[in-house]
Amino acid sequence: CSMSDPTTTDPDRTYTSVPANEAKSRTRLVQFKVPGQPQGKQRARGGYGGKPYTPKKTREYEALISSCAARARGVQRPFSGPVGVIITAYRRRPAQPAPGHECRDGIEVHGHRLCTCKPDADNVAKAVLDGMTLARCWGDDDQVAHLVVWKHWCNVGAAPRLSVVAYEIGGEG
């Protein structure tokens, strides 16, 4: 896990910056990176007796996100008002796509190619928001009023990762 320093030049900054029109009202910020290939939240499975459970892979990934978010949040109190979240998933391009799962190249934006394959952006967001809820970044992820998810292929030599910025909208600090 790493925290992004907003004062340094960061290649992820283009995608994880708080929108200019919202920056004026932003009073608090939690910004972090999660190493590894981004994953989406998997569907709950039916267990013994029909009781649903969250798959182990999802629980482990949400725990990693939670650890990174908690480290970035530090001693800040949880967000109490509406929150905006910007998530950028950087995926490693597969050497050989699985049959039937060929990924189309998206357009290039700020030097990064958009990724149009799995995991779905909404499932990545669910994993991130649930991980941040575990880290007590807020009382509940229903506080998220603004959500942006980008999916990009990693540039050559760059490691796969998630970059996440969460900010309180119009808070009093």
Image (cartoon, helix red, strand yellow):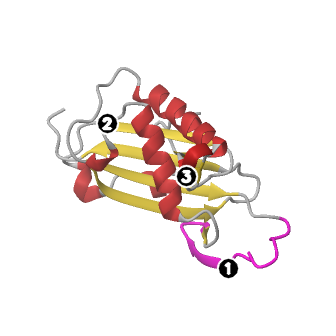
Dominant secondary structure, magenta: loop
Q: Quadrant of residue 102?
A: bottom right
In the image, 35 versus 64, the foreground residue is 64
- Seen in the picture, residue 112 relative to 60 is either above or below; the reply is below
**Region in magenta:** 95-112
Where in the figure is residue 15, as x and y percent of width and height? 47, 57
Query: Which residue reaches farthest left?
Result: 172
* Above or below, 138 relative to 99: above
Q: Measuring 47% from the left and 55% from the top, which residue is drawn there?
A: 125
Residue 147 on the magenta span: no
Q: Amino acid at mark 2?
A: Trp
Residue at 40% across, 29% down:
73
Q: Which tag is nearer the camera, tag 2 or tag 3? A: 3
The residue under label 2 is 138
For image coordinates 53% across by 45% down, the residue present is: 51
Instruction: Give the quarter of the image for residue 6.
Output: top left
Secondary element at image label 2 = loop
| Residue 134 higher or lower than 11, as above or below | above
Tag nearer the camera, 1 or 3: 3
Give the residue drawn at x 64%, y 70%.
117
